[in-house]
Amino acid sequence: MKKKTVVIIALVCLAIILASTAITLYVVMNKKKPQPAATKDEAIPTTTVTATAPQNTAADATTETSPDPSTGAITETAADATQAPAALSAPDTMTEILAQGGSSLQQLSDIGCTQLVTVSSSGSSAQLRFFSCENNTWTEDETLFCSGFVGRNGVTSDMHEGGNASPFGLYHIGDAFYINDQPATGLNSFRITSDTYWVDDPDSSHYNQHMEGTAEKDWNSAEHMIDISGYRYGFVIDYNTAAAYGKGSAIFFHISSNPTAGCVGTDESSVLAYLAKLNASANPFIMIV
C-alpha cells in the first residue's frame, strides 16, 4: 500500500474518533441533574380547607327560659334553636291562662314541666285548676277545679313585703308541709314543729328561708308556722328564692277560707287533693294571674 494512502486512512480514523468523543462530551454536559427529594425542613406544602357552618335563620328562632333573679319567676327570652319544637297541645283554657301570664306550652316543655297548677284571680278570689302532660298532650283534671283566694290586694307584679298581694307569674312548686299527719304526696315534704320558722325580716341573712330553731337567729320578724292553722297542709311556692330585699316572703299554697296576706288558699280537701296529685319528678309549676 502506498504511504500516501495509509496516511489518509489514519487521518480519517482519527477524525472519526475525535467526532465521537466530542458528541459524547456534549451529551454528558447537557444532561439535566436530578432534583433532590424534599427534606424534613423543606416539607412539601399542603392546602388546608376549612368549612364555615351556616348561620341560623329567622326560621330557626325559638325561646329559652330563665328565672328572674329577683323573684324566681320563669320568663321567656329569644334564643336560637337547631331543631323544630315538638308538636304540643292543650285545652284552650290552659293556653289562655299561660298567655295571660306571658308564657306558653313551649316554655313549659323547655323547662321540663309536666304538671301545672293555675290560679286565675279576680280581685282577691280565684279559680284553681290542675293540668298534666303526657306525650306532649296536656289535659285538665277537672276533679281538681275549685274556688280559692289570693292576697287581699289581689295579684301584682310589683311585690313588696307586707303588700298583702300574691305574685304574678310562673313559679316552681317546692316542698309540701304539714303539722300533724303526713299527707299523701309525691312532693318532698317537711313537718312543721314548734321550732319551725319562715323568716320575713328583709334585714335578716335568712330572709325568705325556712329555719328550724333559733340558733342562727338574726331576725326581728318570722312566721312561727305552727301557730297558723291554715298551714296544717300546704306547699311552698318558690317565689323570691334569691331573697331580693323587701320583695316578699313566705308565699305558700295552703288551707284558707278567706283572702290571704299573699299566699294562694283553698279548702282543706282541695289542698289534700292537689298534694296527692303533685309529684316532684314531674317538675311542677304554678301560674298565678
Image (spheres, rainbow, N blue to C red):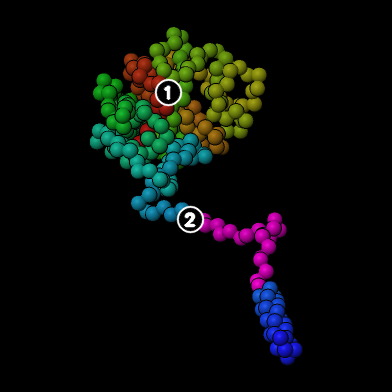
Left or right side of 16 for 234: left
Q: Which label sits on residue 52?
A: 2
Q: Residue at x 42, y 48 (%)?
A: 80
Q: Amino acid at mark 2?
A: Thr
Residue 16 appears anywhere in the view: yes
Quadrant (top left, top right, bottom left, bottom right) of the C terminus: top left
Residue at horizontal 27 percent and vertical 23 percent from the top: 141
Quarter of the image with the N terminus in it: bottom right
| Residue 225 on image: x %, y % | 50, 18
Whether residue 279 sits left or right of residue 125 in the image: it is: right
Q: Specify whether residue 40 is painted magenta.
A: yes
Residue displayed at 25% across by 33% down:
91
Where disc 2 sits, the SS reads: loop
Q: Nearer the viewer, residue 126 or 236?
A: 236
Q: Which residue is mark 1?
A: 281
C-alpha distance separating marks 1 and 2? 41 Å
Task: Please identify, in this view, whether the residue under mark 1 or under mark 2 is nearer the observer.
Answer: 2
The image shows residue 269 at horizontal and vertical percentages of 33, 15
Residues drawn in magenta: 31-51
Which label's residue is closer to the chain start, 1 or 2? Answer: 2
Q: Which of the two residues, 252 or 92, is positioned nearer the viewer here?
A: 92
Does 97 sit left or right of 46 as displayed? left
